[in-house]
Amino acid sequence: MGAKLLLNDLLSLTFSPSGHLIALANLKNEKDNSLFSVDMKTGEMSLLSKVAVDKIVFPRKLEKSKI
């Protein structure tokens, strides 16, 4: 299918607030890392953008009773 294997480990992996699995990786030891959307059924990663960060996180929604 033309899929390429990831040569390096993922730098960060998290779920977005909308439930999408998002991965951060550096495919070719470049200056900037790459942000990917990950298909949870197939594991296929689709490039979203290049970013100058080392980790990704999204804030959790607080329950109204905890605010």
Image (cartoon, helix red, strand yellow):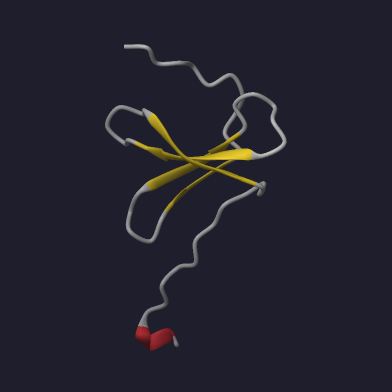
Residue drawn at the location 67% of the way across and 46% of the way down:
54
Residue drawn at the location 62% of the way across and 32% of the way down:
26
| Residue positioned most to the right | 31
Q: Position of residue 61 (x, y in %)?
A: 41, 72
Q: Is residue 60 left or right of residue 27?
A: left
Q: Position of residue 63 (x, y in %)?
A: 37, 79
Nearest the eye: 10 or 52: 52
Query: From what the image shows, is residue 48 above or below residue 6?
Result: below
Of the 4 image quadrants, the one containing the C terminus is bottom left
Of the 4 image quadrants, the one containing the N terminus is top left
| Residue positioned most to the left | 41
Say which quarter of the image contains residue 44.
top left
Q: Position of residue 64 (x, y in %)?
A: 36, 85
Residue drawn at the location 33% of the way across and 54% of the way down:
19
Nearest the eye: 63 or 14: 14
| Residue positioned most to the top | 1
Residue drawn at the location 64% of the way across and 24% of the way down:
28
Q: Position of residue 52 (x, y in %)?
A: 66, 47
